Image (cartoon, rainbow, N blue to C red):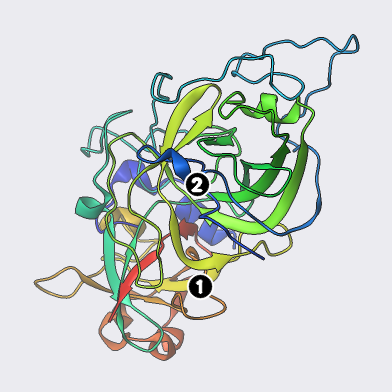
Amino acid sequence: MSKQLTDETRRRVLTAGGSAALMGLAGCLGGDSGDESDGGMEEESDGGMEGESDGGMENESDGGMEEESDGGMEGEGMEAEPTDPDEAPRTTIDRFSEAAGTLHVRGSDNDLPAAGDPVDFDERFLVDGFGPDGQRVRYYDFDVQPTAPAPIYAFVRENGDPVEGQRNVVGVVPGDDGYNDFWHVHRVTVSDEYVANTVTGVEGVLGGDFEVEATDTIKNCPVVPDGSTAERRHGADESAADLVEGWYDGEIVYYFLFEERALEPSDGEVPLSPIYVSFNTNPGQEGGGPQSGFATEAGNDQTHNVTSTVPSDAAYSPLWDVNIYDNADFDSVSDLDSALDAAILASGAARVNCPVVSEN
């Protein structure tokens, strides 16, 4: 969550609170905007999986090949023409619409970027807090996300090598039902005859004659408008800060990649880690909760939000389970023990994607 939130960004959070192996490449990489040699990904899978609940497709009974509306094609895609990513249309991404945002929703009382405009996450979506031992941590705020990951499809040859130049394929973007910054990596095995970027949409993946396997890997890849920036990465994260290209319904989308710690699904969902936060005005009071902004030290932006883990911890996850403590305890909270001693006003108020990018 960013430092200042408005009336229109409060919306669902406090309601929710009250009801309370082998990675050859990055996994989300599929050839990025600057280097097509990145290819797909190599993953060790724990079993085959054909299709996904978000849109399987039956082959035509006459064995014909029909081009799909999203640029995919039945069969191995060899009769279709590949699409040059540089020439493909770009999807307009809006993370601040009513459909996409929870804490950060564009309105008359804020200046959040318009749909398709690049977002500087370093300028307005970095938060300073504390780690469990009192170390200072900094994290991005990518808003509330569900715990059910969305599938992302990465292409490999039958020998396991990534398909050079093939962009990964996703079926949802911010604002779509089922979208999540967190992606469950699925490996799509294609023959040596397959030409990179012949399949450019989920229907082409699931309607084709491909082997599709769910891996044990989840990646944190927020989809953002072209030109967006988030330059910081944790010292344990070797991924580049550059945007990565992917396919969505025959169009190019862009996303960041955060890999400060490897993530695996827990009972099919994104794992959670607790965080403890306080606001300038307590929830339940007029103007209270997220819209009042995080409580900070006088004269600077240092919050006393406390993460229960950091990337070196086995239990770390960038999807934080938000617990709100009484701001009367703000001065006494500086580490996990003191946060646990504070009066908790709401547990499980939201699940927010906030990858830790520094600690000292």
Does 247 appear above or below 279? above
Q: Mark 2 points at which residue?
A: 29
Does 137 appear above or below 171? below
The quadrant the N terminus occupies is bottom left
Q: Which of 263 and 1 is in front in this view?
A: 263
Residue 295, x across and y down, in percent: 25, 69
The residue shown at (56%, 77%) is 315
Give the image quarter of residue 311: bottom left
Extreme-right residue of the structure: 61
The residue shown at (42%, 25%) is 91
Q: How many labels does the image show?
A: 2
Residue 328, x across and y down, in percent: 30, 79
Categorize mark 2 by other alpha carbons within 10 Å: few (<14), some (14-19), many (20+): many
The circle drawn on residue 274 is: 1
Categorize mark 1 by other alpha carbons within 10 Å: few (<14), some (14-19), many (20+): many
The circle drawn on residue 115 is: none
Q: Do the residues labelled 1 and 2 touch (CB within 8 Å)?
A: no
Residue type at numbered disc 1: Pro
The quadrant the C terminus occupies is bottom left
Position of residue 62 in the picture relative to residue 346 (left or right): right
Residue 247, x across and y down, in percent: 52, 30
